[in-house]
Amino acid sequence: MIEMTLREIADVVGGTLHDCPDPEVTVTGAVEFDSRRIGSGDLFLALPGERTDGHDFAAKAVAAGAVAVLAARPVGVPAIVVEPRSSGPSRAIALAHDTDGSGAAVLEALAKLARASVNRLVAAGALTVIGVTGSSGKTSTKDLLAAVLAPLGPVVAPPGSFNNEIGHPWTALRANAETRFLVLELSARGPGHIRALTEIAPPSIGVVLNVGVAHLGEFGSREVIAQTKGELVEALPSTGLAVLNADDQLVSAMSARTSARVVQVGLSTGADVRASNVVMDDQARASFTLHQGERTVEVSLAVHGEHQVGNALAAAAVALECGANLATIAAALSGANAVSERRMDVRTRPDGVTVINDSYNANPDSVRAALKALVTMSKSGADSRRSWAVLGEMGELGEESVIEHDRIGRLVVRLDVDRLIVVGQGRPLRALWQGAVQEGSWGEESLLVPDIESAIALLDDEVEAGDIVLVKASKSVGLWTVAEHLLEATR
Protein backbone atom coordinates (compact mmCIF):
# COMPACT_ATOMS: atom_id res chain seq x y z
CA MET A 1 0.00 0.00 0.00
CA ILE A 2 1.03 3.60 -0.19
CA GLU A 3 2.63 4.96 2.97
CA MET A 4 0.05 6.48 5.30
CA THR A 5 0.10 7.80 8.84
CA LEU A 6 -2.11 6.31 11.51
CA ARG A 7 -4.13 9.53 11.52
CA GLU A 8 -4.65 9.28 7.74
CA ILE A 9 -5.72 5.64 8.00
CA ALA A 10 -8.17 6.44 10.78
CA ASP A 11 -9.69 9.19 8.64
CA VAL A 12 -9.98 6.88 5.63
CA VAL A 13 -11.65 4.00 7.49
CA GLY A 14 -13.74 6.09 9.87
CA GLY A 15 -11.91 4.74 12.91
CA THR A 16 -10.68 6.09 16.22
CA LEU A 17 -7.09 6.02 17.43
CA HIS A 18 -6.47 4.18 20.70
CA ASP A 19 -3.19 3.92 22.63
CA CYS A 20 -1.39 5.82 19.87
CA PRO A 21 1.13 8.22 21.41
CA ASP A 22 2.12 9.51 17.95
CA PRO A 23 -0.68 9.63 15.33
CA GLU A 24 1.87 10.68 12.70
CA VAL A 25 3.69 7.34 12.78
CA THR A 26 3.66 5.94 9.25
CA VAL A 27 2.71 2.47 8.03
CA THR A 28 5.48 1.69 5.56
CA GLY A 29 4.92 -2.03 5.11
CA ALA A 30 2.08 -4.40 4.32
CA VAL A 31 -1.31 -5.16 5.80
CA GLU A 32 -1.33 -8.66 7.32
CA PHE A 33 -3.97 -10.73 9.12
CA ASP A 34 -1.52 -13.49 10.15
CA SER A 35 0.58 -12.37 13.11
CA ARG A 36 3.27 -14.87 12.11
CA ARG A 37 3.90 -12.91 8.90
CA ILE A 38 4.20 -9.46 10.46
CA GLY A 39 7.30 -7.43 9.63
CA SER A 40 8.60 -4.03 10.53
CA GLY A 41 6.28 -1.18 9.51
CA ASP A 42 3.24 -3.40 8.88
CA LEU A 43 -0.39 -2.91 9.88
CA PHE A 44 -1.98 -5.92 11.60
CA LEU A 45 -5.58 -6.79 10.75
CA ALA A 46 -7.45 -8.26 13.74
CA LEU A 47 -10.11 -10.62 12.42
CA PRO A 48 -12.16 -13.16 14.35
CA GLY A 49 -11.27 -16.65 13.18
CA GLU A 50 -12.99 -19.99 13.35
CA ARG A 51 -10.81 -21.07 16.27
CA THR A 52 -8.97 -17.93 17.38
CA ASP A 53 -9.59 -14.18 17.41
CA GLY A 54 -7.00 -11.92 15.81
CA HIS A 55 -7.55 -9.38 18.58
CA ASP A 56 -5.84 -11.82 20.95
CA PHE A 57 -2.66 -11.60 18.86
CA ALA A 58 -2.47 -7.80 18.68
CA ALA A 59 0.32 -7.43 21.24
CA LYS A 60 2.33 -10.17 19.56
CA ALA A 61 1.97 -8.43 16.19
CA VAL A 62 3.16 -5.09 17.56
CA ALA A 63 6.09 -6.77 19.26
CA ALA A 64 7.00 -8.31 15.88
CA GLY A 65 7.15 -4.87 14.24
CA ALA A 66 3.59 -3.85 13.42
CA VAL A 67 3.05 -0.10 13.69
CA ALA A 68 -0.55 -0.58 14.81
CA VAL A 69 -3.60 -2.82 14.68
CA LEU A 70 -6.79 -2.34 12.69
CA ALA A 71 -9.35 -3.69 15.14
CA ALA A 72 -12.97 -3.68 16.28
CA ARG A 73 -12.10 -2.87 19.91
CA PRO A 74 -9.16 -1.47 21.92
CA VAL A 75 -6.40 -4.05 22.31
CA GLY A 76 -3.92 -2.37 24.68
CA VAL A 77 -1.45 -1.47 21.91
CA PRO A 78 -1.59 1.19 19.18
CA ALA A 79 -4.81 0.59 17.27
CA ILE A 80 -7.25 2.09 14.82
CA VAL A 81 -10.62 0.96 16.13
CA VAL A 82 -13.72 0.64 13.94
CA GLU A 83 -16.84 -0.23 15.86
CA PRO A 84 -19.46 -2.68 14.54
CA ARG A 85 -22.67 -0.99 13.41
CA SER A 86 -25.97 -2.29 14.74
CA SER A 87 -27.45 -1.97 11.25
CA GLY A 88 -24.80 -4.28 9.83
CA PRO A 89 -22.28 -3.74 7.01
CA SER A 90 -23.19 -1.85 3.88
CA ARG A 91 -21.61 -4.46 1.63
CA ALA A 92 -22.21 -8.18 1.23
CA ILE A 93 -19.73 -9.31 3.87
CA ALA A 94 -20.37 -12.40 5.94
CA LEU A 95 -18.12 -14.49 8.17
CA ALA A 96 -19.72 -17.60 9.62
CA HIS A 97 -17.84 -17.15 12.91
CA ASP A 98 -18.43 -13.38 13.16
CA THR A 99 -21.02 -13.48 15.93
CA ASP A 100 -20.83 -9.82 16.99
CA GLY A 101 -20.15 -8.09 13.66
CA SER A 102 -16.57 -7.22 14.57
CA GLY A 103 -15.19 -9.11 11.57
CA ALA A 104 -17.53 -7.30 9.20
CA ALA A 105 -16.49 -3.95 10.68
CA VAL A 106 -12.79 -4.71 10.20
CA LEU A 107 -13.38 -5.98 6.65
CA GLU A 108 -15.33 -2.82 5.84
CA ALA A 109 -12.36 -0.80 7.05
CA LEU A 110 -9.95 -2.96 5.05
CA ALA A 111 -12.02 -2.36 1.90
CA LYS A 112 -12.00 1.40 2.46
CA LEU A 113 -8.25 1.39 3.01
CA ALA A 114 -7.67 -0.61 -0.17
CA ARG A 115 -9.90 1.71 -2.16
CA ALA A 116 -8.03 4.79 -0.91
CA SER A 117 -4.63 3.28 -1.69
CA VAL A 118 -5.62 2.09 -5.18
CA ASN A 119 -7.30 5.38 -6.02
CA ARG A 120 -4.18 7.35 -5.18
CA LEU A 121 -1.96 5.05 -7.22
CA VAL A 122 -4.29 5.22 -10.24
CA ALA A 123 -4.59 9.01 -9.93
CA ALA A 124 -0.80 9.25 -9.96
CA GLY A 125 -0.80 7.43 -13.30
CA ALA A 126 1.21 4.56 -11.89
CA LEU A 127 -1.28 1.71 -11.81
CA THR A 128 -3.59 -0.24 -14.14
CA VAL A 129 -6.16 -2.44 -12.40
CA ILE A 130 -7.26 -5.60 -14.23
CA GLY A 131 -10.17 -7.76 -13.04
CA VAL A 132 -10.79 -11.36 -14.11
CA THR A 133 -13.97 -13.36 -13.55
CA GLY A 134 -15.64 -16.47 -14.92
CA SER A 135 -17.05 -19.76 -13.76
CA SER A 136 -13.72 -21.48 -14.31
CA GLY A 137 -10.18 -20.57 -15.33
CA LYS A 138 -9.82 -17.38 -13.28
CA THR A 139 -6.70 -18.45 -11.43
CA SER A 140 -4.95 -19.91 -14.47
CA THR A 141 -5.71 -16.75 -16.45
CA LYS A 142 -4.52 -14.56 -13.59
CA ASP A 143 -1.22 -16.45 -13.60
CA LEU A 144 -0.86 -16.10 -17.38
CA LEU A 145 -1.66 -12.39 -17.11
CA ALA A 146 1.08 -11.94 -14.54
CA ALA A 147 3.50 -13.66 -16.93
CA VAL A 148 2.65 -11.60 -20.04
CA LEU A 149 2.56 -8.28 -18.16
CA ALA A 150 5.82 -8.81 -16.25
CA PRO A 151 8.03 -7.63 -19.16
CA LEU A 152 6.14 -4.31 -19.06
CA GLY A 153 6.61 -3.61 -15.36
CA PRO A 154 6.05 -4.87 -11.80
CA VAL A 155 2.88 -6.92 -11.34
CA VAL A 156 0.89 -7.69 -8.19
CA ALA A 157 -1.48 -10.67 -8.36
CA PRO A 158 -3.10 -12.78 -5.63
CA PRO A 159 -1.43 -15.99 -4.49
CA GLY A 160 -3.58 -18.93 -5.48
CA SER A 161 -7.27 -18.11 -5.59
CA PHE A 162 -7.42 -15.27 -3.08
CA ASN A 163 -10.53 -13.64 -4.50
CA ASN A 164 -13.05 -12.94 -1.73
CA GLU A 165 -13.82 -10.11 0.71
CA ILE A 166 -10.55 -10.71 2.55
CA GLY A 167 -8.22 -11.69 -0.27
CA HIS A 168 -9.37 -9.03 -2.70
CA PRO A 169 -8.52 -5.93 -0.61
CA TRP A 170 -5.49 -7.68 0.90
CA THR A 171 -4.10 -8.20 -2.62
CA ALA A 172 -4.98 -4.64 -3.68
CA LEU A 173 -2.99 -3.34 -0.72
CA ARG A 174 0.13 -5.16 -1.99
CA ALA A 175 0.34 -2.57 -4.76
CA ASN A 176 2.67 0.35 -4.11
CA ALA A 177 4.21 3.22 -6.02
CA GLU A 178 6.41 0.83 -8.02
CA THR A 179 3.53 -1.43 -9.11
CA ARG A 180 2.37 -0.97 -12.67
CA PHE A 181 -0.27 -3.71 -12.91
CA LEU A 182 -2.68 -5.02 -10.29
CA VAL A 183 -4.34 -8.26 -11.44
CA LEU A 184 -7.34 -9.36 -9.40
CA GLU A 185 -9.68 -12.33 -9.46
CA LEU A 186 -13.33 -11.60 -8.73
CA SER A 187 -15.41 -14.41 -7.32
CA ALA A 188 -19.05 -14.40 -6.23
CA ARG A 189 -21.52 -16.39 -4.18
CA GLY A 190 -24.49 -14.37 -5.41
CA PRO A 191 -25.64 -11.26 -7.26
CA GLY A 192 -23.98 -8.05 -6.13
CA HIS A 193 -20.77 -9.65 -4.90
CA ILE A 194 -18.67 -8.83 -7.97
CA ARG A 195 -20.02 -5.29 -7.98
CA ALA A 196 -18.92 -4.93 -4.36
CA LEU A 197 -15.41 -6.15 -5.22
CA THR A 198 -15.12 -3.68 -8.12
CA GLU A 199 -15.87 -0.89 -5.65
CA ILE A 200 -12.80 -1.87 -3.60
CA ALA A 201 -10.37 -1.69 -6.52
CA PRO A 202 -12.11 -0.20 -9.59
CA PRO A 203 -10.74 -1.94 -12.71
CA SER A 204 -10.04 -0.26 -16.01
CA ILE A 205 -9.73 -3.62 -17.79
CA GLY A 206 -12.17 -6.46 -17.19
CA VAL A 207 -11.95 -10.05 -18.44
CA VAL A 208 -14.94 -12.42 -18.47
CA LEU A 209 -13.91 -15.97 -19.36
CA ASN A 210 -17.08 -18.05 -19.32
CA VAL A 211 -20.45 -18.70 -17.73
CA GLY A 212 -20.75 -22.27 -16.50
CA VAL A 213 -22.65 -24.04 -13.75
CA ALA A 214 -20.17 -23.57 -10.90
CA HIS A 215 -22.06 -22.44 -7.77
CA LEU A 216 -25.34 -23.16 -9.54
CA GLY A 217 -26.90 -24.05 -6.20
CA GLU A 218 -26.28 -20.53 -4.93
CA PHE A 219 -27.30 -18.68 -8.10
CA GLY A 220 -30.18 -20.82 -9.32
CA SER A 221 -29.54 -20.56 -13.07
CA ARG A 222 -26.85 -19.83 -15.65
CA GLU A 223 -28.71 -16.65 -16.54
CA VAL A 224 -28.30 -15.35 -12.97
CA ILE A 225 -24.63 -16.38 -13.07
CA ALA A 226 -24.21 -14.41 -16.30
CA GLN A 227 -25.95 -11.41 -14.78
CA THR A 228 -23.54 -11.53 -11.85
CA LYS A 229 -20.37 -12.06 -13.90
CA GLY A 230 -21.41 -9.12 -16.07
CA GLU A 231 -21.22 -6.81 -13.06
CA LEU A 232 -17.50 -6.60 -13.85
CA VAL A 233 -17.97 -5.06 -17.31
CA GLU A 234 -20.70 -2.76 -16.00
CA ALA A 235 -18.15 -1.32 -13.56
CA LEU A 236 -15.64 -0.40 -16.28
CA PRO A 237 -15.22 3.25 -17.28
CA SER A 238 -15.92 4.37 -20.83
CA THR A 239 -12.16 4.68 -21.29
CA GLY A 240 -11.65 1.07 -20.21
CA LEU A 241 -11.56 -2.28 -21.98
CA ALA A 242 -13.78 -5.36 -21.69
CA VAL A 243 -12.21 -8.63 -22.87
CA LEU A 244 -15.01 -11.10 -23.62
CA ASN A 245 -15.06 -14.74 -24.72
CA ALA A 246 -16.50 -14.80 -28.24
CA ASP A 247 -17.09 -18.56 -27.97
CA ASP A 248 -19.47 -18.25 -25.01
CA GLN A 249 -22.76 -16.68 -26.07
CA LEU A 250 -23.66 -15.50 -22.57
CA VAL A 251 -20.30 -13.77 -22.25
CA SER A 252 -20.21 -12.31 -25.74
CA ALA A 253 -23.63 -10.74 -25.12
CA MET A 254 -22.17 -8.74 -22.22
CA SER A 255 -20.82 -6.27 -24.77
CA ALA A 256 -24.21 -4.56 -24.55
CA ARG A 257 -23.76 -4.03 -20.81
CA THR A 258 -20.61 -1.91 -20.84
CA SER A 259 -19.61 1.55 -21.99
CA ALA A 260 -16.02 0.36 -22.33
CA ARG A 261 -14.39 -0.68 -25.57
CA VAL A 262 -14.84 -4.42 -26.23
CA VAL A 263 -12.33 -6.96 -27.52
CA GLN A 264 -13.66 -10.44 -28.26
CA VAL A 265 -11.31 -13.41 -27.93
CA GLY A 266 -11.67 -17.07 -28.87
CA LEU A 267 -11.56 -19.62 -31.65
CA SER A 268 -14.34 -17.90 -33.57
CA THR A 269 -13.21 -16.37 -36.84
CA GLY A 270 -14.97 -13.16 -35.82
CA ALA A 271 -12.91 -12.73 -32.65
CA ASP A 272 -10.54 -9.76 -32.47
CA VAL A 273 -7.83 -11.88 -30.84
CA ARG A 274 -8.14 -15.50 -31.86
CA ALA A 275 -6.39 -18.84 -32.14
CA SER A 276 -6.20 -21.19 -35.09
CA ASN A 277 -4.37 -24.44 -35.87
CA VAL A 278 -4.60 -25.67 -32.28
CA VAL A 279 -2.52 -28.82 -31.79
CA MET A 280 -2.10 -30.77 -28.55
CA ASP A 281 1.14 -32.58 -27.69
CA ASP A 282 1.43 -35.78 -25.65
CA GLN A 283 1.44 -33.73 -22.43
CA ALA A 284 -1.84 -31.98 -23.33
CA ARG A 285 -0.02 -28.72 -24.01
CA ALA A 286 -1.44 -26.62 -26.81
CA SER A 287 0.37 -24.99 -29.69
CA PHE A 288 -1.52 -22.55 -31.88
CA THR A 289 -1.36 -19.54 -34.14
CA LEU A 290 -2.30 -16.33 -32.33
CA HIS A 291 -4.04 -13.75 -34.52
CA GLN A 292 -4.56 -10.07 -33.95
CA GLY A 293 -6.11 -8.74 -37.12
CA GLU A 294 -3.70 -9.55 -39.92
CA ARG A 295 -0.76 -10.11 -37.56
CA THR A 296 0.12 -13.59 -36.34
CA VAL A 297 2.58 -15.32 -34.06
CA GLU A 298 3.12 -18.94 -33.02
CA VAL A 299 2.56 -19.91 -29.38
CA SER A 300 3.43 -23.15 -27.58
CA LEU A 301 1.98 -23.26 -24.08
CA ALA A 302 3.79 -24.92 -21.19
CA VAL A 303 0.60 -25.31 -19.14
CA HIS A 304 -1.62 -28.36 -19.57
CA GLY A 305 -5.10 -28.60 -21.06
CA GLU A 306 -6.80 -27.40 -24.22
CA HIS A 307 -8.90 -25.02 -22.11
CA GLN A 308 -5.73 -23.00 -21.53
CA VAL A 309 -5.94 -21.68 -25.09
CA GLY A 310 -8.88 -19.43 -24.20
CA ASN A 311 -7.13 -18.30 -21.03
CA ALA A 312 -4.01 -17.45 -23.02
CA LEU A 313 -6.01 -15.45 -25.56
CA ALA A 314 -7.57 -13.38 -22.80
CA ALA A 315 -4.14 -12.70 -21.31
CA ALA A 316 -2.79 -11.76 -24.74
CA ALA A 317 -5.62 -9.29 -25.36
CA VAL A 318 -4.92 -7.54 -22.07
CA ALA A 319 -1.18 -7.43 -22.73
CA LEU A 320 -1.76 -5.93 -26.19
CA GLU A 321 -3.91 -3.22 -24.61
CA CYS A 322 -1.12 -2.48 -22.12
CA GLY A 323 1.51 -2.03 -24.83
CA ALA A 324 3.10 -5.45 -25.35
CA ASN A 325 3.88 -6.71 -28.84
CA LEU A 326 2.97 -10.12 -30.21
CA ALA A 327 6.50 -11.50 -30.05
CA THR A 328 6.88 -10.60 -26.39
CA ILE A 329 3.46 -12.05 -25.60
CA ALA A 330 4.22 -15.30 -27.41
CA ALA A 331 7.50 -15.69 -25.55
CA ALA A 332 5.86 -15.01 -22.18
CA LEU A 333 2.96 -17.41 -22.82
CA SER A 334 5.31 -20.12 -24.03
CA GLY A 335 7.45 -19.78 -20.93
CA ALA A 336 4.65 -19.53 -18.36
CA ASN A 337 4.32 -22.54 -16.08
CA ALA A 338 1.59 -23.33 -13.57
CA VAL A 339 2.11 -21.10 -10.54
CA SER A 340 -0.89 -21.63 -8.28
CA GLU A 341 -0.80 -24.93 -6.43
CA ARG A 342 -3.06 -27.92 -7.10
CA ARG A 343 -4.20 -26.68 -10.50
CA MET A 344 -3.24 -28.96 -13.38
CA ASP A 345 0.03 -29.59 -11.54
CA VAL A 346 1.61 -32.41 -13.56
CA ARG A 347 4.46 -34.37 -11.99
CA THR A 348 6.04 -37.74 -12.74
CA ARG A 349 7.51 -40.19 -10.25
CA PRO A 350 10.79 -42.01 -10.87
CA ASP A 351 8.84 -45.12 -11.90
CA GLY A 352 7.00 -43.18 -14.61
CA VAL A 353 3.67 -42.76 -12.80
CA THR A 354 2.33 -39.30 -13.70
CA VAL A 355 0.04 -37.50 -11.26
CA ILE A 356 -2.21 -34.63 -12.39
CA ASN A 357 -3.05 -32.77 -9.19
CA ASP A 358 -6.03 -30.60 -10.11
CA SER A 359 -7.62 -30.93 -6.71
CA TYR A 360 -7.90 -27.30 -5.63
CA ASN A 361 -11.48 -27.04 -6.85
CA ALA A 362 -13.95 -28.57 -9.27
CA ASN A 363 -17.07 -27.78 -11.24
CA PRO A 364 -18.52 -29.57 -14.27
CA ASP A 365 -16.65 -27.42 -16.79
CA SER A 366 -13.26 -27.76 -15.11
CA VAL A 367 -13.72 -31.51 -14.59
CA ARG A 368 -14.52 -31.97 -18.27
CA ALA A 369 -11.41 -30.01 -19.22
CA ALA A 370 -9.23 -32.02 -16.85
CA LEU A 371 -10.60 -35.35 -18.12
CA LYS A 372 -9.90 -34.35 -21.71
CA ALA A 373 -6.33 -33.45 -20.75
CA LEU A 374 -5.94 -36.81 -18.99
CA VAL A 375 -7.06 -38.68 -22.09
CA THR A 376 -4.83 -36.62 -24.38
CA MET A 377 -1.84 -37.39 -22.19
CA SER A 378 -2.62 -41.08 -21.88
CA LYS A 379 -3.52 -41.82 -25.50
CA SER A 380 -0.90 -39.73 -27.32
CA GLY A 381 2.33 -41.20 -28.56
CA ALA A 382 3.21 -44.64 -29.81
CA ASP A 383 2.31 -46.39 -26.55
CA SER A 384 -0.87 -45.54 -24.69
CA ARG A 385 -0.77 -45.34 -20.90
CA ARG A 386 -3.38 -46.58 -18.47
CA SER A 387 -5.46 -43.65 -17.22
CA TRP A 388 -7.08 -43.18 -13.82
CA ALA A 389 -9.66 -40.57 -12.84
CA VAL A 390 -9.90 -40.17 -9.07
CA LEU A 391 -12.88 -37.88 -8.56
CA GLY A 392 -14.64 -36.42 -5.54
CA GLU A 393 -17.73 -34.30 -5.17
CA MET A 394 -18.30 -31.06 -7.07
CA GLY A 395 -19.87 -28.75 -4.52
CA GLU A 396 -22.46 -25.97 -4.68
CA LEU A 397 -24.47 -27.34 -7.61
CA GLY A 398 -27.81 -27.31 -5.80
CA GLU A 399 -30.68 -29.23 -7.35
CA GLU A 400 -28.57 -30.00 -10.42
CA SER A 401 -25.91 -31.81 -8.41
CA VAL A 402 -27.07 -35.36 -9.08
CA ILE A 403 -27.60 -34.65 -12.78
CA GLU A 404 -24.20 -33.01 -13.22
CA HIS A 405 -22.39 -35.82 -11.40
CA ASP A 406 -24.18 -38.38 -13.55
CA ARG A 407 -23.04 -36.54 -16.68
CA ILE A 408 -19.43 -36.60 -15.54
CA GLY A 409 -19.61 -40.35 -14.87
CA ARG A 410 -20.91 -40.94 -18.38
CA LEU A 411 -18.24 -38.66 -19.88
CA VAL A 412 -15.48 -40.65 -18.18
CA VAL A 413 -16.63 -43.71 -20.12
CA ARG A 414 -17.17 -41.88 -23.41
CA LEU A 415 -13.64 -40.50 -23.21
CA ASP A 416 -12.37 -44.04 -22.62
CA VAL A 417 -10.68 -43.39 -19.28
CA ASP A 418 -9.42 -46.79 -18.11
CA ARG A 419 -10.23 -46.63 -14.40
CA LEU A 420 -12.62 -44.44 -12.39
CA ILE A 421 -12.39 -44.16 -8.61
CA VAL A 422 -15.22 -42.16 -7.05
CA VAL A 423 -14.30 -41.03 -3.54
CA GLY A 424 -16.90 -40.30 -0.86
CA GLN A 425 -20.50 -40.90 0.07
CA GLY A 426 -23.84 -39.34 -0.75
CA ARG A 427 -26.26 -39.14 -3.68
CA PRO A 428 -24.12 -37.02 -6.05
CA LEU A 429 -21.13 -39.36 -5.80
CA ARG A 430 -23.30 -42.44 -6.21
CA ALA A 431 -24.79 -40.74 -9.29
CA LEU A 432 -21.29 -40.19 -10.69
CA TRP A 433 -20.42 -43.86 -10.24
CA GLN A 434 -23.79 -45.08 -11.53
CA GLY A 435 -23.53 -42.81 -14.56
CA ALA A 436 -20.30 -44.57 -15.50
CA VAL A 437 -21.83 -48.00 -14.87
CA GLN A 438 -24.91 -47.24 -16.94
CA GLU A 439 -22.70 -45.95 -19.74
CA GLY A 440 -20.96 -49.32 -19.86
CA SER A 441 -18.20 -49.29 -17.25
CA TRP A 442 -18.54 -51.93 -14.55
CA GLY A 443 -16.60 -54.36 -12.42
CA GLU A 444 -13.12 -53.11 -11.53
CA GLU A 445 -13.25 -50.35 -14.16
CA SER A 446 -15.41 -48.05 -12.00
CA LEU A 447 -15.40 -48.21 -8.22
CA LEU A 448 -17.08 -46.21 -5.47
CA VAL A 449 -14.99 -46.02 -2.28
CA PRO A 450 -16.16 -44.40 0.96
CA ASP A 451 -13.22 -42.16 1.82
CA ILE A 452 -9.75 -40.88 0.97
CA GLU A 453 -8.02 -43.63 2.95
CA SER A 454 -9.79 -46.29 0.90
CA ALA A 455 -8.81 -44.56 -2.34
CA ILE A 456 -5.17 -44.39 -1.28
CA ALA A 457 -5.11 -48.06 -0.33
CA LEU A 458 -6.63 -49.07 -3.67
CA LEU A 459 -4.24 -46.95 -5.67
CA ASP A 460 -1.23 -48.21 -3.73
CA ASP A 461 -2.23 -51.76 -4.63
CA GLU A 462 -3.10 -51.23 -8.26
CA VAL A 463 -1.28 -48.25 -9.82
CA GLU A 464 1.56 -49.50 -12.00
CA ALA A 465 4.65 -47.92 -13.50
CA GLY A 466 3.72 -45.66 -16.40
CA ASP A 467 0.11 -45.06 -15.32
CA ILE A 468 -1.30 -41.54 -15.32
CA VAL A 469 -3.64 -40.45 -12.51
CA LEU A 470 -5.93 -37.40 -12.41
CA VAL A 471 -7.08 -36.27 -8.96
CA LYS A 472 -9.91 -33.72 -8.90
CA ALA A 473 -12.68 -32.56 -6.55
CA SER A 474 -13.98 -29.44 -4.86
CA LYS A 475 -11.66 -27.88 -2.33
CA SER A 476 -13.77 -28.95 0.67
CA VAL A 477 -13.09 -32.61 -0.14
CA GLY A 478 -9.33 -32.27 0.42
CA LEU A 479 -8.58 -34.81 -2.29
CA TRP A 480 -5.09 -33.39 -2.78
CA THR A 481 -4.11 -35.80 0.00
CA VAL A 482 -4.40 -38.56 -2.59
CA ALA A 483 -2.21 -36.76 -5.12
CA GLU A 484 0.41 -35.87 -2.54
CA HIS A 485 0.51 -39.44 -1.24
CA LEU A 486 1.00 -40.82 -4.75
CA LEU A 487 3.89 -38.47 -5.39
CA GLU A 488 5.54 -39.37 -2.09
CA ALA A 489 5.07 -43.11 -2.58
CA THR A 490 7.99 -45.18 -3.82
CA ARG A 491 7.68 -48.49 -5.63
Image (tube, rainbow, N blue to C red):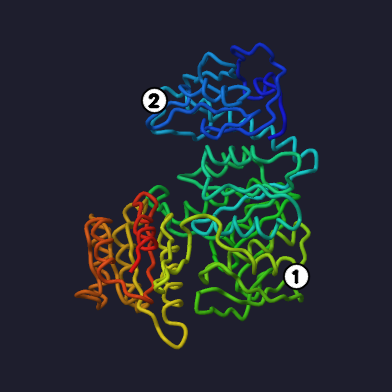
Q: Quadrant of residue 171?
A: top right
Residue 100 image position (x, y, % from top left): 42, 22
Kindly indicate the quadrant of the structure image that contains residue 94: top left
Give the CA distance from mark 1 to mark 2: 54 Å
Front position among marks 1 and 2 = 1
> Contact (CB < 8 A) between labels 1 and 2?
no
Q: Which mark is residue 247?
A: none
Report the label total: 2
**Dot 1 or dot 2, earlier in sequence:** 2
Farthest residue toward the left? 443
Q: Is residue 82 above or below residue 479?
A: above
Tag 1 residue: 327
- Residue type of the residue flagged with mark 2: Thr
Q: Is residue 424 toward the left or the right of residue 79 in the image?
A: left
Rendered position, 316 above or below 34: below
Where does label 2 land, which residue? 99
- Residue 258: x %, y % from top left: 66, 52
**Which image quadrant: the C terminus?**
bottom left
Amino acid on which disc 1 is placed = Ala
Q: Which quarter of the picture shows residue 255?
A: bottom right
The residue sitting at the bottom extreme is 382
**Around disc 1, counting alpha carbons within 10 Å, would you say few (fewer than 14), some (14 to 19), or many (20 or more)?**
few
Residue at x 50% of width, y 75% of height: 283
Image spot of residue 393 (x, y percent): 32, 57
Task: Say which of 265 and 6 sits in front.
Answer: 6
